[in-house]
Structure formats: structure tokens, C-alpha cells
Image (cartoon, rainbow, N blue to C red):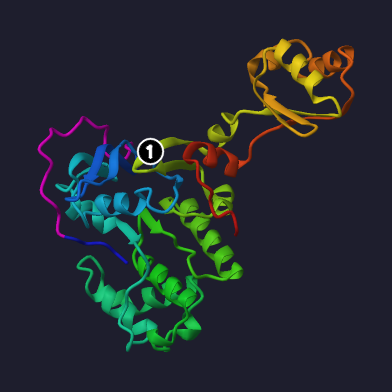
């Protein structure tokens, strides 16, 4: 849906200095916080930085504060404290300008069940004061075609499957050109083919210049289309970086298989390796810079194991995958299906 909500009251804090419009991040927050009346802190002082032109994967387990954050960004709920900018405009003062250039899909689609898909989009477009009614029909058909619903445009919404409803919501977002798209679980309910199509669509939109902030549980989506990542856990932003940097910062572990693991442990300790774990005949440890910086690197360690009389059956260096990285940050698993 296109968001055009009534702005919330301005924050009492002064607005932090920002760069020139057009050079600012697409989304930026300063200590954004949401505390409910019950005392629960849903979002705890986060500083988001979503680069313009990026596909930003906004990740975290259920209840981590992702949707609450998105609702605050769009003015659907007011923050307890902190400030934020969208497309270089301080919010909520700049809502009238910024929100016209933003498309959002939050917490699933909501349409009139007795109307057709096309009729629902027609009503949605008519409610947008920035939309040109003379081009409405053409834009609606183009949006329906982009999400693969043109053939079902005359079908009533109540007869749509969950995946079709999600596609129609995406069509609603695409009725106007957008500089920023904020999508909350856009592939929810889609079959594998539909999921691939949405991934392709997001990639195309980013290639055309739009910034996409994508809230998702699917690591496969992140790995295939995201350029940057922010990870939420219990209301806090525990990591934020380009995806390539997050992978590069992952700690590699050495893995030694031996029928005498105690001997392997002694050698690893002598080399200064840490976090040594023994599971049966498998010994692992954090490789770190101690070995990596030595002449020969891990190969030097293999020689040392042999020289120490360790019967080595297998040796390798294991780099954590994206799931391992996120579990290490949150202590919880993610849905890695695609």
C-alpha cells in the first residue's frame, strides 16, 4: 500500500545536522525508541543507515522489533524518543514531501473482498492525491502485469489465494514511481516460482534507482538480492554493514579430525588458538589472526600437528555461513528456506 498517514507530533529533541538532499541515506534514524505503556521496550535506541540505491535486508527473529520500527518510520505509530529521516527529509515535518515518493507493504495486504483486483487498485489510486487520474488505467494494468496478475484482474479479491493477495499488494506499491520501497515480508504466501519473480522484481527496481528496505526471515532472499544488512534482536540493532563486510568479518574455525583429539588440542593451544571444542574425534577452534598471520598460515598448523605425532585424518578451515553469523548475533535460528 502507499502510505500517506497523518504525521505524528515532532520530537522534542533538536534535529541532528544532515547532508544535502540527494546525498543523504534513504533511511536514517537517531536513537529511535518505542516503549509501550506496559513498559515493554519494543525498539531500543537504534541508529539505522540505509544507503540510497541499496537493497537493505532488515532481519531478526519474530518479536525483535522490525515491524514496529517500520511503522515508526512511516508515521503509523509515534516513537517514544529519537528521530528519523526519509529520503533526506526530517520526519514528521517532511512527511508531506517524503511519503509521496515512498511505497510500503506492511503486515500483509488489506483490500475490499467484494471488489476485483483491478477495482481495488483503482480505489487505491484514486485515494492518492499525487496520482494523475488520466493515466490511472494504464498504470494499473502495468502494475498488474509486473506482478503477474493481469489475467486475474477481474477476479474478486476474496477468491484470491494468499500468494495472489500478496502480489496485488505489491501491485499497489508499484502504481507510482517510488524512490524508496519498504517491504515487510513481500514473499509471504508465494510459491517458489512467485518468490523468484518477486526477487527479480526487487532487483529490477533497485537497478532502476529505487532503494529497497526488505524485512524478511528468509536468508536465501538476503544472499541473492541484498547489498546491505541490519540485524535486530530484542529491540536492538546488533549488526549493520554491507553484506560482503558481514561475511568477511565472520570468524573462521579450523577443524581437525583425529583418533587422538587430546593431542590435537595440545598443538592448537600451543599455536594460540582459542575457543577449542572437542566432539568425539573432531576438534575445532577459532583460527584467528595468530595462525593466519604466520608464514604458511593454516598449512603451517598441519605440519605442526604431524610433527607432534597427531594422527590427522582430516583437516580444514570452515568459514561460517550467513545463518551461522545471524545465530551468533541473536542466539536464534532463521528460516533459511527459499
The N terminus lies in which quarter of the figure? bottom left
Foreground pick, 100 / 233: 233
The residue lying at 49 percent from left, 54 percent from top is 217
Magenta stretch prevailing secondary structure: loop
The magenta span reads 6-24
The residue lying at 39 percent from left, 70 percent from top is 169
The C terminus lies in which quarter of the figure? bottom right
Any magenta on residue 23? Answer: yes
Q: Is residue 48 above or below residue 311?
A: below
Q: Mark 1 falls on what kind of element?
A: strand
Q: Is residue 165 above or below residue 2?
A: below
Name the spot of residue 91 as percent of width and height, x first: 19, 46
The residue lying at 42 percent from left, 76 percent from top is 165
From the image, tell me which residue sits under label 1.
237
Instruction: Examine the image and state in which quarter residue 18 appears.
Output: top left
Any magenta on residue 321? Answer: no
Foreground pick, 32 / 117: 32
Name the spot of residue 160 as percent of width and height, x first: 44, 83
Amino acid at each position: 500500500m502507499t502510505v500517506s498517514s497523518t504525521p505524528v507530533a515532532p520530537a522534542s529533541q533538536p534535529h541532528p545536522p544532515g547532508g544535502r538532499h540527494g546525498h543523504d541515506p534513504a533511511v536514517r534514524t537517531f536513537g529511535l525508541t518505542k516503549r509501550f505503556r506496559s513498559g515493554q521496550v519494543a525498539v531500543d535506541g537504534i541508529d539505522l543507515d540505509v544507503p540510497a540505491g541499496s537493497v537493505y535486508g532488515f532481519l531478526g527473529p519474530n518479536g525483535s522489533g522490525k515491524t514496529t520500527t517500520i511503522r515508526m518510520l512511516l508515521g503509523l505509530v509515534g516513537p517514544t524518543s529519537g528521530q528519523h529521516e526519509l529520503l533526506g527529509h526530517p520526519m514528521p515535518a517532511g512527511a508531506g514531501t517524503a511519503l509521496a515518493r515512498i511505497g510500503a507493504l506492511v503486515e500483509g495486504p488489506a483490500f475490499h473482498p467484494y471488489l476485483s483486483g483491478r477495482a481495488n487498485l483503482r480505489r487505491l489510486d484514486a485515494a492518492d492525491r499525487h496520482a494523475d487520474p488520466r493515466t490511472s488505467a494504464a498504470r494499473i494494468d502495468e502494475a498488474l502485469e509486473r506482478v503477474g496478475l493481469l489475467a486475474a484482474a477481474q477476479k474478486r479479491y476474496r477468491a484470491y489465494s494468499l500468494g495472489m493477495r500478496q502480489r496485488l499488494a505489491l501491485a499497489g506499491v508499484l502504481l507510482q514511481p517510488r524512490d524508496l520501497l519498504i517491504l515487510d515480508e513481500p514473499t509471504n504466501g508465494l510459491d517458489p516460482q512467485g518468490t523468484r519473480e518477486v526477487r527479480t522484481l526487487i532487483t529490477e527496481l533497485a537497478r532502476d534507482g529505487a532503494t529497497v528496505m526488505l524485512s524478511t526471515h528468509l536468508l536465501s532472499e538476503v544472499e541473492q538480492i541484498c547489498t546491505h544488512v541490519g540485524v535486530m534482536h530484542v529491540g536492538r540493532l546488533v549488526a549493520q554493514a554491507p553484506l560482503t563486510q558481514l561475511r568477511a568479518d565472520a570468524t573462521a574455525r579450523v577443524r581437525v579430525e583425529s583418533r587422538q583429539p587430546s593431542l590435537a588440542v595440545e598443538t592448537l593451544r600451543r599455536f594460540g588458538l582459542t575457543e577449542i571444542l572437542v566432539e568425539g574425534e573432531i576438534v575445532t577452534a577459532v583460527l584467528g589472526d595468530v595462525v593466519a598471520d604466520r608464514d604458511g598460515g593454516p598449512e603451517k598448523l598441519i605440519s605442526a600437528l604431524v610433527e607432534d605425532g597427531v594422527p590427522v585424518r582430516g583437516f580444514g578451515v570452515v568459514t561460517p555461513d550467513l545463518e551461522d553469523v545471524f545465530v551468533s548475533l541473536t542466539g536464534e535460528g532463521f528460516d533459511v528456506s527459499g
